[in-house]
């Protein structure tokens, strides 16, 4: 064996650990691992006489969907595109955006929006499909209150962190997959001939010759709806842990689907109960319902956490308005966004109340994930092109995945009238919000004017700082600036300082915050505009780092004092300050839409939507992690198109 091969094996072994595999099983595969509960109920209707061509064709389609979509696309190819260990559609976007035009953000926005839409439908359908297993003993049981109670509990506990519950995720899910595989094998053992479906010819013949067989792909697609989570959760568990875990997961899934197929063929007719519960032995039926419910809760929990992470990335990339973000636990990457939590809960409960049964929810399920997967395919192709991969690999891979996913998309379009329109509206609404927010921020930036510091403005600033007859406003005055250049500053900041009442400070700070493409960057660079008078700080934060600017300022000031770059006692009054750095104030300047604007209808409409969205976002002190006691808010009018053509007539 070559030295390179031995080194690769040792590296792979060091990255794969039992604990990592356990966590991966608990966090990553919950969504795809609970799909056997409802996939077949979407394909085989109650009372339907089972046709062997359909049963074997469906099983073959599922096996090869799991192979092509999940194994080849996500496990083998997409997981290669890691951003310093992080995955997900927004991480993928940050890897390629420097190589392509601004249009590429549309793919990321569409993919991210419809993935969040998936987070709205997955918890209701998963929990409902598990709870409905009780209908074997209670045929007329109203499961809606039970499902809503579980969902409310699930969302309420988010604010306390999931580190305690997270410890049982792995063991419970391993038990779930083992149970699923064992009962699947038990049912399969009565008819091993269904394994003929491993041959893709059965899938091909089914799609080609079975009446309306192609349109059943919308139900088949449900078996792989959790594949996108594999990539999104890579940063939590590691690429190789996911790959090793998938071997066990895929075997369990195929055994479950094969066992359900064997039961359908032997029973000859589908009934009102999911085929999954029909293969569960009666002595352990109730424990099986309890275990499946726990598995769906865990799957929902993982997806909710994934939505928080996705929203956090969108916020840091400037694609979504800021919301309050809380870090409830000590686990890296664990966060809680109250606005998203309660909005998701309301949406999930609405889905339950509207559809009422999991079989009806299946009509709305799958369409949004198909659009997300298509977006990921486009982005991963662009990623491979940017890394100069061989066209001999890129072209056939692209054709294969686009063919499969466009086929699924066409089949899922049938679901629009059956409830899929809800997911389309949700995904489209989220996409529109992201696009309008990005456009609005971009427009604001374009209208921002700048002035040079040298020579006049800096001289005025230093003169104001040393003016003995002017009352001191604060020891330190900090402005958050959008200017990336130390030599230039926004006119609105100059107006804030030099407009009466003058803001005299001993030391002025201008913080520029830039979000990097790496997830956990935390760096800063100092430019001295005038020693002991004015400093420009370029603060670089990774897109997953909370912007605690108040804390960062104090640390930076203390480091400068310690290094002697900032003389704390060069002013008489600072000698008596109890605070090590002295008092400080942040000036937060935000815009409002001026009445001086003269805008066309469409532009006025979009701008007003932007400001309404801005009103729902957190205030700037929460945005930048500032202590409210140290913040002063100011507003300035923003004029997009001035109404200069208006002429007033003077009457004599």
Image: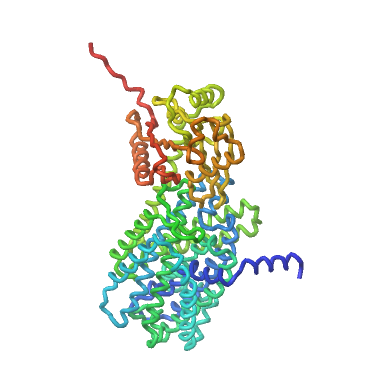
List the single residue furthest toward the front: 576
Q: Where 524 falls versus 446 (above or below)?
A: below
Q: Is residue 220 left or right of residue 420?
A: right
Residue at image position (44%, 80%) is: 260
Can residue 641 be seen here? The reply is: yes
Quadrant in which the N terminus is drawn: bottom right
- Disc count in the image? 0
Q: Position of residue 371 (x, y in %)?
A: 45, 58
Res. 19 image quadrant = bottom right
Residue at image position (28%, 64%) is: 353
Q: Where 386 falls versus 553 (above or below)?
A: below
Pick the residue in front: 387 or 527.
527
Q: Is residue 44 left or right of residue 476?
A: left
Residue at image position (46%, 31%) is: 493
User: How was this image coloured?
Assistant: rainbow
Res. 234 image quadrant = bottom right
Pick the residue in front: 282 or 544.
544
Q: Position of residue 5 (x, y in %)?
A: 72, 67
Q: Position of residue 388 (x, y in %)?
A: 65, 52
List the single residue furthest toward the top: 652
Residue at image position (62%, 66%) is: 15
Can residue 57 be seen here? The reply is: no
List the single residue furthest toward the left: 652
Q: Position of residue 308 (x, y in %)?
A: 44, 57
Pick the residue in front: 161 or 89.
161
Quadrant in which the C terminus is drawn: top left
């Amino acid at each position: 064996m070559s030295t390179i091969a031995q080194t690769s094996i040792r590296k792979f072994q060091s990255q794969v650990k039992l604990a990592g595999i356990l966590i991966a099983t608990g966090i990553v595969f919950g969504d795809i691992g609970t799909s056997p509960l409802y996939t077949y109920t979407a394909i085989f209707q109650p009372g339907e006489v089972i046709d062997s061509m359909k049963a074997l064709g469906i099983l073959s389609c599922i096996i090869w969907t799991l192979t092509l979509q999940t194994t080849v696309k996500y496990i083998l190819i997409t997981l290669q595109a890691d951003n310093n260990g992080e995955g997900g559609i927004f991480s993928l976007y940050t890897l390629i955006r420097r190589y392509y035009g601004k249009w590429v953000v549309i793919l990321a926005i569409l993919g991210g929006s419809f993935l969040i839409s998936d987070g709205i439908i997955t918890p209701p359908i998963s929990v409902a499909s598990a709870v409905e297993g009780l209908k074997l003993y209670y045929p007329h049981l109203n499961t809606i209150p039970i499902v809503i109670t579980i969902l409310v509990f699930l969302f309420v506990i988010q604010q306390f962190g999931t580190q305690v519950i997270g410890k049982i995720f792995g063991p419970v899910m391993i038990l779930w997959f083992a149970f699923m595989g064992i009962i699947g094998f038990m049912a399969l053992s009565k008819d091993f001939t269904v394994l003929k479906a491993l041959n893709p010819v059965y899938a091909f013949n089914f799609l080609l010759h079975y009446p309306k067989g192609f349109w059943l792909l919308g139900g088949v697609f449900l078996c792989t709806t959790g594949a996108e989570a594999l990539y999104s959760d890579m940063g939590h568990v590691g690429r190789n842990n996911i790959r090793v875990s998938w071997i066990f997961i895929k075997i369990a899934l195929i055994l479950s689907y094969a066992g359900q197929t064997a039961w359908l063929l032997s029973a000859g007719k589908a009934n009102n109960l999911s085929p999954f519960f029909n293969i569960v032995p009666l002595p352990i039926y109730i424990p099986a319902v309890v275990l499946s419910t726990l598995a769906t809760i865990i799957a929902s929990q993982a997806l909710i956490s994934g939505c928080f992470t996705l929203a956090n990335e969108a916020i840091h990339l400037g694609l979504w308005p800021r919301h309050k973000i809380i870090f409830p636990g000590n686990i890296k990457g664990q966060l809680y966004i109250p606005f998203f939590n309660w909005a998701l809960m309301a949406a999930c409960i609405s889905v339950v109340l509207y559809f009422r049964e999991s079989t009806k929810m299946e009509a709305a399920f799958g369409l949004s994930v198909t659009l997300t997967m298509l977006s990921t395919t486009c982005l991963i192709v662009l990623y491979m092109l940017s890394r100069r991969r061989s066209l001999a690999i890129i072209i056939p891979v692209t054709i294969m995945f686009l063919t499969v996913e466009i086929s699924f998309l066409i089949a899922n379009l049938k679901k629009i009238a059956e409830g899929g329109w809800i997911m389309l509206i949700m995904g489209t609404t989220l996409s529109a919000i992201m696009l309008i927010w990005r456009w609005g921020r971009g427009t604001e930036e374009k209208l921002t004017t700048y002035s040079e510091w040298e020579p006049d403005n800096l001289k005025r600033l230093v003169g104001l700082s040393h003016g003995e007859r002017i009352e001191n406003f604060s020891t330190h005055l900090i402005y958050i600036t959008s200017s990336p250049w130390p030599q230039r500053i926004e006119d609105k900041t100059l107006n804030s300082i030099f407009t009466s009442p003058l803001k005299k400070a001993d030391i002025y700070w201008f913080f520029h915050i830039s979000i990097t493409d790496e997830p956990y960057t935390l760096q800063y660079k100092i430019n001295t505009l005038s020693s002991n008078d004015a400093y420009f700080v370029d603060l670089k934060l990774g897109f997953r780092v909370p912007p605690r600017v108040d804390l960062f300022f104090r640390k930076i000031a203390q480091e400068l004092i310690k290094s002697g770059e900032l003389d704390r006692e060069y002013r008489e009054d600072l000698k008596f300050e109890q605070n090590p750095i002295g008092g400080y104030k942040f000036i937060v300047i935000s815009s409002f839409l001026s009445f001086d604007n003269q805008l066309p209808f469409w532009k006025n409409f979009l701008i007003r939507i932007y400001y309404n969205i801005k009103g729902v976002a957190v205030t700037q002190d929460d945005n930048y992690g500032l202590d409210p006691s140290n913040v002063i808010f100011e507003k300035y009018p923003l004029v997009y198109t001035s109404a200069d053509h208006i002429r007033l007539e003077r009457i004599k």
